[in-house]
Image (cartoon, helix red, strand yellow):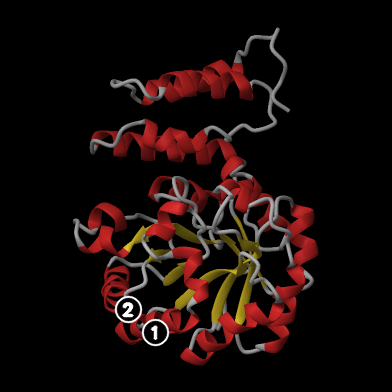
Amino acid sequence: MTHPILSVAPMMGCTDRHFRYLLRLISPKALLYSEMITTGALLYNAPEAFLQHAQDEPVALQLGGSDPKALAACAVLAESFGYQEVNLNCGCPSDRVQTGGIGACLMATPEVVADCFRAMQAATALPITIKCRIGIDDHDSYDDFLGFIAPNYEAGCRLFVVHARAAILKGLSPKDNREIPPLKYDYVTRIQKDFPKAVFVLNGGLKTVEDVLAARAQVPSLMLGRAIYNDPWLLHRLDVALDQAHAIDPAAIIDQFRDYMQVQLAQGVRLKHMTRHLLGLYLGQPGARSYRRYLSEHMFEDDAGIEVFDRAITHRQTPNRTAPYDE
């Protein structure tokens, strides 16, 4: 199974259709993932509210669930809405997700996951993939990891996205779970050798171009999340470093996204749902703090329109010179 070299991780509250539209303007090749959407949300509500998207392909839908029939039905929906991949979340450690019996806690029952995989694969022509950790709690040996991968490989899964940390199911917040458990990249390189016909995408702890280039020497595909959310232009710098870049004009991209926001505003979308993804747009540049402060203070107003974004840019261009730059 082939897979793009670079992908952007599914992130709750981050990788919605608006942020993905921005990222697609920046990078034509990176695979983008949706936020995790539960099967219940799709099957008991209007699915278009969650699945509509525009001009962000290639894009994968990440599902949260543990019922094979429900997941199969949602995989069919994903295909009908033009997604290119369906990914099953077996890596999220949040308490709320665990309460629903989904996410990282599924790693304790690899056969259940395999049943889910088979049901989804039988229901759609789309590739079905799995995102997981290297283990949960103190079940984080390589043999534990192998015990999850092997039955799902036997079920037919040929692509696993691996956050190379264990998930601590009690006592750590999702944020702490992204930072405190030690990274074990060697598990991912080893499992790739043990299953050479599968693709293992390395996720976790990759924050810079240098991190990605070092990891690229060991694994075929890489996934970044928060680093790109906080600095969207990092995605282009990574494309350049990986020799898959095309020339971009940041000012033109910002203008294109402004046009997109105007269309969305006319359709009733609130400004805050789009501009909350733009706080890192000028990270490290003069005036970034003034831009970010103005946008943060005004985008939540009930009548906020495109002029709020325009004024924020004006504040960046004429910042308070007594304030330090946001380097």
Above or below 21: residue 47: below
Q: Pick the residue in front: 76 or 58.
A: 76
Residue 96 spot, x, y in % from top left = 41, 52
Farthest top residue in view = 322
The residue pinned by badge 2 equals 68
Q: Based on the displayed image, in which of its 4 quarters is residue 5 positioned?
A: bottom right
Residue 97 spot, x, y in % from top left = 42, 57
Above or below 95: residue 313: above
Q: Pick the residue in front: 132 or 78.
A: 132
Disc 2, SS: helix
Quadrant where the C terminus sits is top right
Residue 214 spot, x, y in % from top left = 80, 63
Amino acid type of the residue that numbered disc 1 sits on in the rendered structure: Asp
In the picture provided, is 77 more to the left or to the right than 186?
A: left
Residue 37 spot, x, y in % from top left = 36, 59
Farthest bottom residue in view = 154
The tag on residue 76 is none
- Identify which residue is drawn at 51% across, 65% down: 104
The residue pinned by badge 1 equals 115
Asked whether residue 56 is in view, the answer is no
Label 2 crowd bin: few (<14), some (14–19), many (20+), radius 10 Å: some
Q: How many callouts does the rendering have?
A: 2
Marks 2 and 1, the one that precedes in the sequence: 2
Label 1 crowd bin: few (<14), some (14–19), many (20+), radius 10 Å: some
Amino acid type of the residue that numbered disc 2 sits on in the rendered structure: Pro
- Identify which residue is drawn at 66% across, 57% down: 239
- Identify which residue is drawn at 62% across, 22% down: 289
Above or below 199: residue 260: above
Disc 1, SS: helix
Tell me whether circle 2 and circle 1 mark residues in contact (CB < 8 Å): yes
- Identify which residue is drawn at 32% across, 69% down: 78
In the picture provided, is 198 more to the left or to the right than 63?
A: right
